[in-house]
Image (cartoon, rainbow, N blue to C red):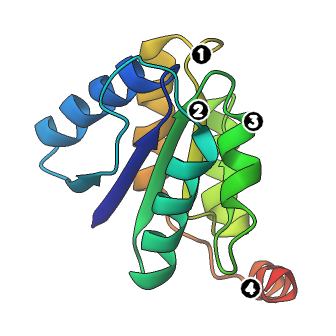
Amino acid sequence: MKVFLGADHAGYKLKEKIKQFLEQKKIGFKDFGTNSTESCDYPDFAKKVATAVQKNKGSYGVLVCGTGTGTAIAANRFSGVRTVQATSEYLSKMAREHNNANVISLGARVTPEKDALKFVETFLSTAFSKEERHVRRVKKIG
């Protein structure tokens, strides 16, 4: 499994916690930054993660900004990238199982760290169901 990480200044600290979590789980990742809390633009990091997911079949992305909204919107502009703005463990699971989402977006200012880590764990451990109805629907997304 390969995971691509990206965050803006608001998401930097949570991204660092997610890196520690992935290291503990021995999950390979590449960090596209940012590497500080200095103000920066979330679309730049969403683009890096989304293009990496596009180019690496079967990979996943984890994005973090203040609310999770901006990075989700920016990443979903890229063909083949299906980003969920995760606000619960259930949503993280259903996005993978029913929508074959390949990027999760988190809000560092609105999601407690322990919840965010659980959302990432659930997202990465849940398989796409491959039931005909879900496959058909995801194909319609493109």
Mark positioned earlier in the residue sequence (4 or 2): 2
Q: Earlier in the sequence, mark 3 or mark 1?
A: 3
Name the residue type under label 2. Leu
Front tag of 4 and 1: 1
- Graded by Cα atoms within 10 Å as few (under 14), some (14 to 19) or many (20 or more), the crowding at tag 3 reads some
Q: Which mark is residue 135?
A: 4
Looking at the image, tell me whether mark 4 or mark 1 is earlier in sequence order. Answer: 1
Q: Nearer the viewer, mark 3 or mark 2?
A: 3
Tell me which residue sits at (48%, 23%) in the image: 9
Residue 18 showing in the rendered view? yes
Q: Bin the neighbour count of mark 4 within 10 Å (Cα to Cα): few under 14, some 14-19, many 20 and up.
A: some
Q: Hey, what amino acid is under mark 4?
A: Val
Element class at badge 3: helix
Dots 3, 1 in contact, CB < 8 A? no
Which image quarter is the C terminus in?
bottom right
Q: Residue 69, labelled with which disc?
A: 3
Label ID, residue 106 = 2
